[in-house]
Image (cartoon, rainbow, N blue to C red):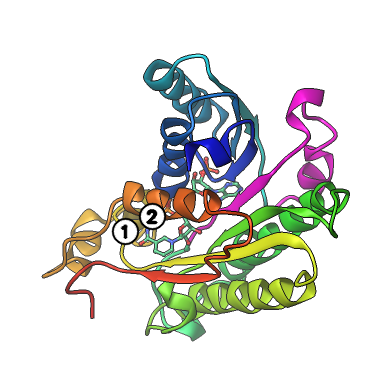
Amino acid sequence: MAKRLEGKTIVVTGASSGIGKSTAKEFARTSPKNLKLIITARRIDTLKEVAAEIKQEVGDGVQVLPVKLDVSNPEEINNFVSSLPEEFREIDVLVNNAGLVKGVAQAPEIATEDIKVMFDTNVTGLINMTQAILPIFKKRPEGGRGDIINIGSIAGREPYSGGSIYCATKAAVRSFTDAMRKELIATRIRVIEIDPGQVETEFSVVRFNGDKSKADAVYKGVEPLTGDDIAEIVVFAAGRRENVVIADTLVFPSHQA
Ligand code: NDP
């Protein structure tokens, strides 16, 4: 697997914490030779810390470029590729991981602004990132080459009470991913979706607006996954032989209902 990833240029969105941070680290650990990692999120200082941790762990074989990028801002996405240093522009893998949930509330109580933030980030952000990177993939032989790996959620398949908007955003990711896979069927561009169940990250507390006791209550009777558990699957999918597409994977902890 390490050999197949060697020399690749990989973008991970939402790499300042949780699954994205773990994914960036797992790519670096798995293929510490000639890898170029572009890690993006809004918190640039945190991204710089992640880059330093990666360097410390795997050494100089991996070049890490932290880039401040708000995926809910189309203008930032428009400028993203052209603002990369030349040697980072031949992107091979895009991991669309950035995402959030704004609170847990019944549908009528959800503020319009929160609905907008969730859709702008989880759906439009993911679509705009894909549109920005796809021309790079499409220039390659046989209709194009590259991997788009979208992080969906079990919530996109099994909506839950109090999460109507978040669930709707993840259902949208699922439809978009399926349609993209069909549109690109004649190419070597792989479109992959990985849907986590419960993973303990900053997300767990953010969704309850910082209330840790409510966050912990969700995991009663369940040992949640870690970001590393999902990261291993993302890297596994990217490291398959070109003809193998791990199209759609649901990953949840034992005991999650
Ligand atoms: P975290 O809150 O730990 O990480 C979310 C990441 O997304 C952060 O790096 C954050 O960085 C980034 N982010 C949020 N908004 C934006 C934005 N507008 N632009 C750019 N980056 C943004 O959560 P997880 O690691 O758990 O979440 C990662 C993905 O996994 C999400 O798509 C989430 O929906 C999905 N997921 C999570 C599950 C869980 O139980 N934790 C379960 C199923 C799916 P910053 O704040 O620096 O911008």
Q: Is residue 212 magenta?
A: no
Corner quadrant of residue 242: bottom right
Residue under circle 1? Answer: 199
Q: Secondary structure at mark 2?
A: helix
Q: Nearer the viewer, mark 2 or mark 1?
A: 2
Left or right: residue 188 compared with residue 59: right
Of 155 and 251, nearer the camera is 251
Residue 207: percent from the left, percent from the top?
38, 61
- Amino acid type of the residue that numbered disc 2 sits on in the rendered structure: Ile
Residue 188: percent from the left, percent from the top?
74, 60
- Amino acid type of the residue that numbered disc 1 sits on in the rendered structure: Val
Q: Are marks 2 and 1 in contact (CB under 8 Å)?
A: yes
Residue 39: percent from the left, percent from the top?
58, 35
Picture residue at 58% right of the left edge, 33% below the top = 6
Picture residue at 38% right of the left edge, 49% below the top = 232
Residue under circle 2? Answer: 230
Marks 2 and 1, how far apart at CA? 8 Å
Kindly tell me whether mark 1's CB lies below 8 Å from ligand 1: yes
User: What's the magenta region?
Assistant: 72-100
